Amino acid sequence: MNEYNVMELMIVLAARHLKDGVSVVVGTGGPCAAVMLAQKTSAPNLLILFEAGGVGPQLPSMPISVGDSRTFYRGIMASTMLDVMDACQRGIIDYAFLGGAQIDVYGNLNSTQIGKDHSHPKVRFPGSGGANDLASLCWRTIIMILHNKRRFVEKVDFVTTPGYLTGKGSREEAGLPKDTGPYKVITNLAVLGFDELTCRMCIELVHPGVNVKKVQENTGFELLKKSPVEVTKPPTEEELRILREEVDPGRYLIGKDPA
């Protein structure tokens, strides 16, 4: 059996959700590692876009920001933020790949503040960047986030990035494109999706050694459950080799304990 840590598992699972030939706008960190792994394994024709304008790069190593020169390496176009956001608005980008400080039952993300008082928050975060635009306009949003009650809350302190807002139909009522929204939430405990009838978050898969009870105990709201809840497939030897030797050889991400 292959030895791996939770961060490696999260990156591998995220990569597996990106099909060959789709397009994805991505930031740095875990999402970037996932798209790099996907491009080097099951999705060689994955079209990667970065907010600063890199389109279709063949990433040689891990970028440190969305404006890193590596995000343009052997790309098909060196464009601008305006071009990337325009592509999202025209409905031609399949996935956005995001993270956040808080997430709620409908997949709304908070990367702005902790505390309800916007003028005097307990903690101030960097804010949206392009995350609001991406989750509003791309067809599906994949989210990578650590799983605990501080992050998984009934209602986020601030809606930086819209999920399904207040439930079924509320995105459309707010003027967002129909049939868009959160797709998967990948955590250190499970893979979660969203119920078609209510748009509430639901457990689809649990990781090896984790059960549904543990996932619920680390969540600040009641999760729905897919029937049956299955166990995620561990990383293969080849996925781990590429992740460790080609994607993150410096172990900047996979060397960290996500707990």
Image (tube, helix red, strand yellow):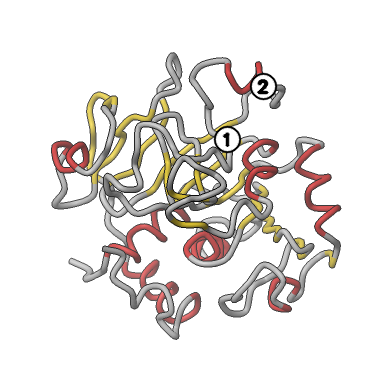
Check the image and name the residue furthest to the bottom: 250
* Coordinates of residue 204 in the picture (x, y in percent): 31, 34
Foreground of the two, 77 or 158: 158
Q: How many marks?
A: 2
For the residue marked with disc 1, what is the amino acid?
A: Pro
Query: What's the amino acid at mark 2?
Result: Ala
Q: Which residue position is annotated with label 2?
A: 174
Give the spatial CA distance, label 2 vs label 1. 10 Å
Residue under numbered circle 1: 162
At x 26% / y 27%, what residue is drawn? 222
Q: Quadrant of the N terminus?
A: bottom left
To which quarter of the image does residue 104 belong?
Answer: top left
Quadrant placement of the C terminus: bottom left
Measuring 23% from the left and 32% from the top, which residue is drawn there? 229
Asked if disc 2 and disc 1 are in contact, CB closer than 8 Å, the reply is yes
Which residue is at 51% across, 16% downward? 168
Residue 184 appears at what percent x and percent y? Answer: 45, 40
Q: Quadrant of residue 115?
A: top left
